[in-house]
Amino acid sequence: MNDRLAIGYGLAAVLLWSTVATAFKITLTYMDPIQMLAAASVVSALSLVAVAGWQGNLHLITSTFFRRPLYYLMLGLINPFIYYLVLFKAYDLLPASLAQPLNYSWAITLTLMAAIFLGQKIRKQDWIAAALGYAGVVVIATKGNVLDLNFDSPLGVGLALFSTLLWAGYWILNAKNQADPVIGLLLGFLLSLPFSIGLSLYSSDWSGIPWQGWLAVSYVGLFEMGITFVLWLKAMKLATNTAKISNLIFISPFISLILLANIIGEQIHPTTLIGLVMIIAGLLIQQRKSKT
């Protein structure tokens, strides 16, 4: 029964994450990346407050924060503030069908960074996975012209790849955090809000945003930055075999490309699929257990 529930929660999370690339591009037609960050962060913080309240854990916020205030401030500045600012700008500069697969290589980045910062051993299969994954990144970014290394938007590609460093770094910093994960995530959003709202008030004009923009950014706040994370945590907690759940995530980028093509009419370059398959293959190789 628990495994059925775990798969249900996991599939719900994966399906919701599959929609966010489309939601990003729709939102960016009404808001700039800074506005999008500020508004989505507010929605996400409210949703996480509701989840923490439902779990009966809201009282943990102050005690958790005061145990390590600078630590949680640093986490909040990395994610959501800098990470999503960089990611949204990458989506602003690139077609979502390019930005999303490039960002998807974060798991390979995490393995390499964990070796540097946590002293974890890099196995032979990790090197194979990294080579295959980053070869896929180059195929996607150059649209198959790998020898020319000619990018449509070098800045956009650079930001998409930089976002993988930020996301991997965030999880490395979180590796030994014993706090409730929802409370930890909520603290990051609450502490980053003054920065994102202040930056948006300084740099952006909030007048004239139609209701469609507010609806789109609310969707992003709920289902990319908030509730979906909680669904995924629930799935992992209920599962007797976490590999079965974690492998569900590989469905997400392919559904995402289908949605991008059918909802906002993005043309999916054939090399995007080739590169994405290379990245997924690398991730699957990375997940294989070493023979003892």
Image (cartoon, rainbow, N blue to C red):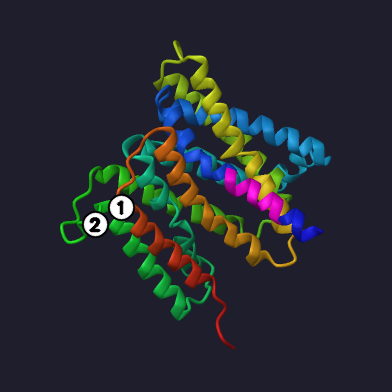
Q: Is residue 132 left or right of residue 177?
A: left
Of labels 2 and 1, earlier in sequence is 2
Magenta stretch contains residue 10: yes
Residue 148 sits in quarter: bottom left
SS for dot 1: helix
> Which corner quadrant holds the C terminus?
bottom right
Residue 91 sits in quarter: top left
Q: Residue at x 33, y 53 (%)?
A: 272
Foreground pick, 71 / 182 = 182
Q: Residue at x 66, y 52 (%)?
A: 10
Name the residue carrying label 2.
144
SS for dot 2: loop
Q: Are marks 2 and 1 in contact (CB under 8 Å)?
A: yes
Image coordinates of residue 130 in percent, x first then y, are 40, 68
Image coordinates of residue 247 in percent, x first then y, are 58, 62
Please, what is the three-letter code of the amino acid marked with disc 1?
A: Pro
Front position among marks 2 and 1: 1
Name the residue carrying label 1.
270
Q: What secondary structure prevails in the magenta region?
A: helix
Please, what is the three-letter code of the amino acid marked with disc 2?
A: Gly
Q: Residue furthest left?
A: 148
Q: Are there few (<14), some (14-19), or many (20+) residues within 10 Å of tag 2?
A: some
Q: Are there few (<14), some (14-19), or many (20+) residues within 10 Å of tag 1?
A: few
Image coordinates of residue 78 in percent, x first then y, are 51, 45
Q: Residue at x 34, y 45 (%)?
A: 268
* Count of numbered circles on the image: 2
Magenta stretch contains residue 53: no
Distance between the alpha carbons at the discs numbered 2 and 1: 9 Å
Provide the residue span drawn in magenta. 7-15
